[in-house]
Image (cartoon, grey):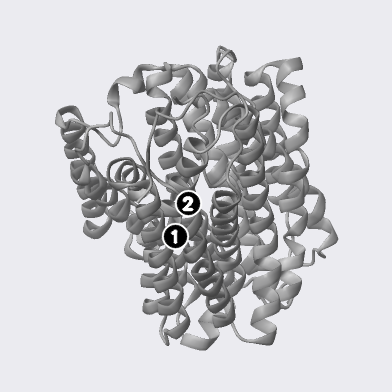
Amino acid sequence: MNVQEQGTAPEDAGRSAPAAVLIATCVSTLVVNANTSAVSILLPAISDDTGTSLDALQWAVTGYSLVGAAVIVTSGALGDVFGRRLVFLGGLALFIASCVLIALSGSGGGVIAGRAIQGAAGATILACGMSLLSVSTSGEGQVRAVTLWGGASAVGAAAGPLLGGVLVDGTGWQGLFWIDAAVALACVPVTLKGVAESRDPARSRSIDFAGTVLIAAVLAPALLALSEGAEWGWTSAAVLGCFAVAVVACVAFVAVERRVEAPLVDLRLLKNRVLIGATVGILLSAGVINGLMYLVSLYFQNPATLALSPFEAGLATLPATVGLIAVTPLVPRMVQWLRIGPVIALGFAAATAGCVMLSFVQGDWKYAAFVLPLVLLAAGLGLVNGPASSASTSTVSAADVGAASGISNMARYIGAAAFTAAVATVNTTVGESRRAEGEGAADALASGLSGACLLLAIASGVGMLLSALAVRARRRRAGPGAYGAAAAAHAHTVPVGSP
């Protein structure tokens, strides 16, 4: 077996990625992101077919992000130690198995379990795929490869809802998962034949499995409390118990991270206020966009509101995705003009304005009324993604870039999981309360969406204020790869400048 050790390749300012590496990594990230973005569009059809409530199926979204947050760093570490190609192939195998499990499931529980497995698979594919790209390229070749990878991720995110909608109407919701399994399976022989194995011989062979378990132990009860708090009662023993378990697990996590040889989170880096500010910005950005897309995907398809078909709902979300992608080419020049902090602040300001506009939604709104706030919000978060990702890695030493990137990647998944759970709870609680007061179905649903968007507006406003922390972010180590992958930053933070 051809095994390449990190750091042993000859210096080359423009080493391009082999075709097989580009095909395997870009196609796999495209299918992972298409799958992720399509799921919210599929939920009403899955609910009708399995008899599972939409509230319960919310865990098909939050469970994916919860598991992804727990394993994103660990999967990268496993690749460094045991072989990036080997672990990447393991991620593909797990993704294929999860797709088959979901497609064959006749119950909501099976779908939710499959999506949790898919969270681990997707995180592994993204982490090890980017590592394979990084070690096989250098200089301008790396910039081109990362830009192509980012473009593939963005295309997947844009195409997912449309493809999901088409397949629901044509083959049923299971069709998406069968196609995704087939595409992932096609990546396996390409990887086996054309991708060289690589490891990091300098890295400790210690893997922080305890930290991985404890991250899940923090997030799972906290998300359960957020999801069920309105029904159980926010001061009930069950909710307080969930939060207590999360706090205890958090304390245990900190204790473990202080003692292990290769920690999941290097607590020393948490003293860097620019890194913390950028990471919080990443968490908020991922949370707002994922929470919003979950809400509008369901709202657009509800028979009491717009009553769009799955395909029409997928098409209706396209302006948000296009807005996110369209600003990407503008980011580098804006950063040169304004610096990182002001660009992030401007992005969050636009996102806040979009959320505020949506908070005035009424039950008789037509689709046209949603377009401007969706574009404004998504374009604003597109301005946040690249600079925040760059800031998170540009203010640490070269040796710490990978660890800083891991913190940001974990934050991205945590934001997606926490905000989806929170807005789903607000949406349901407010909507049911208004319905109990005698409001019509459309007005009650609009009230629920309004309350959830107000929460997202507050989160975006907080991001705008905290962006001042990123003003001091140094740009001397912020390579163009961060901006090339900005369109994909909702899924992964690129460790720019890593050795």
> Residue visible at 35% across and 23% down?
270
Observer-nearest of 431 and 7: 7
Q: Which mark is residue 192?
A: 1
- Relative to 45, say whether 486 is above or below: above
Q: Which residue is mark 2?
A: 195
Residue 444 visible in the displayed image: no
> Residue visible at 35% across and 54% down?
86
- Spatial distance from mark 2 to mark 1, Cα to Cα? 6 Å
> Residue visible at 16% across and 38% down?
252
Q: Classify mark 2: residues with Cα within 10 Å, few (<14), some (14-19) or many (20+).
A: many
Residue 312 visible in the displayed image: yes
**Cβ atoms at labels 2 and 1 below 8 Å apart:** yes
> Residue visible at 64% across and 81% down?
168
Observer-nearest of 256 and 351: 256
Judged from the image, the secondary structure of the residue bearing numbered disc 1 is helix
Q: Amino acid at mark 1?
A: Leu
Place of residue 375 in the rendered image (x, y in percent of width and height, measured from the top left): 77, 47
Place of residue 350 in the rendered image (x, y in percent of width and height, measured from the top left): 72, 35
Q: Amino acid at mark 2?
A: Val
> Which quarter of the rendering shows the C terminus?
top left
Judged from the image, the secondary structure of the residue bearing numbered disc 2 is loop
Answer left or right for 322 relative to 295. right
Answer left or right for 79 relative to 390. left
Place of residue 80 in the rendered image (x, y in percent of width and height, measured from the top left): 33, 40
User: Where on the picture, by quarter, is residue 382?
Assistant: top right
Observer-nearest of 86 and 240: 86
User: Where on the picture, by quarter, is residue 183?
Assistant: bottom right
